[in-house]
Image (cartoon, rainbow, N blue to C red):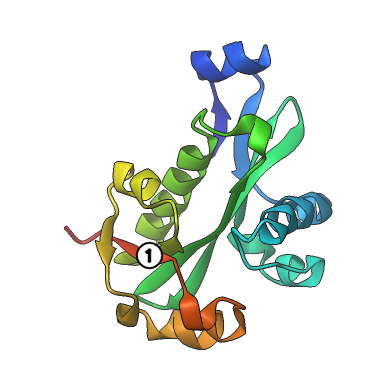
Amino acid sequence: MIGQVHADHIAHMYRTDAIVIRRATCADVDRIAAIVNQHARAGHLLPRSANNIRATLHSWIVAEVDGLIVACGSLLEMNPTLVEVRSLAVLPAYRSHGLGAQIVRELVSEARQRGVPTVFALTRAVPFFERLGFEVTNKERFPEKVMQDCVICPLQRCCDETAVVLDLDD
């Protein structure tokens, strides 16, 4: 359930208990774009324009610490039975404290509520996703992804990402 998350280890790190995981709003678009594109410049994600984020705003979740958006992610429907966790990004100062995992759990919960049986991601952070129940699989299982995003990726011919999947029907 999206809402306030009280996590002692995070509160201690940031001297706060004001950690909120919530749906993104129009007011968040520029901040989401800045976070995603910071990760894109480092080669971790594909860039997303503010217009792209605005057009898919319903699919975005953000994490706030003391009112500042520090992490985000989205759930993109590829077809009625398949969704992708994408553009998962946590600002460096806020990594390793569970915010990314909380966003993924929220996105998986949303997929369950919508009755979508399969959630996947392409990632270099395989152990992170495995801790959340995902399993490594073959990229060819997701031709929708290849047609939509992989064709515009600069690493297309030498992709170093691994496909991970979570089957919700199990």
Q: x, y percentage for residue 20?
A: 62, 32
Measured along the vertical axis of the image, is residue 45 above or below residue 143? above
Which three-letter amino acid code belongs to the residue tagged 1?
A: Thr
Measured along the vertical axis of the image, is residue 144 above or below residue 7? below
Determine the residue positioned at 37% across, 65% down: 162
Q: Which residue is mark 1?
A: 162
Q: Is disc 1 surrounded by few (<14), some (14 to 19) or many (20+) residues within 10 Å?
A: some
Q: x, y percentage for residue 29?
A: 79, 56
Q: Which quadrant would residue 161 be assigned to in this image?
A: bottom left
Please give left or right for residue 25 compared with residue 166 in the image.
right
Dot 1 falls on a residue whose secondary structure is strand
Q: Which quadrant would residue 90 be assigned to in this image?
A: top right
Q: Can residue 167 be seen in the rendering of this structure?
A: no
Determine the residue positioned at 60% across, 62% down: 45
Q: Can residue 163 be seen in the rendering of this structure?
A: yes
Determine the residue positioned at 72% across, 65% down: 53
For the residue pair 57 and 71, the one nearer the viewer reads as 71
For the residue pair 25 and 123, the one nearer the viewer reads as 123
| Number of numbered discs | 1
Q: x, y percentage for residue 123?
A: 45, 60
Determine the residue positioned at 60% across, 49% down: 89
Q: x, y percentage for residue 155?
A: 56, 76
In the orientation shown, which residue stands out farthest toward the front? Answer: 158
Q: Quadrant of the C terminus?
A: bottom left
Please give left or right for residue 43 compared with residue 164 in the image.
right
In the orientation shown, which residue stands out farthest toward the left? Answer: 170
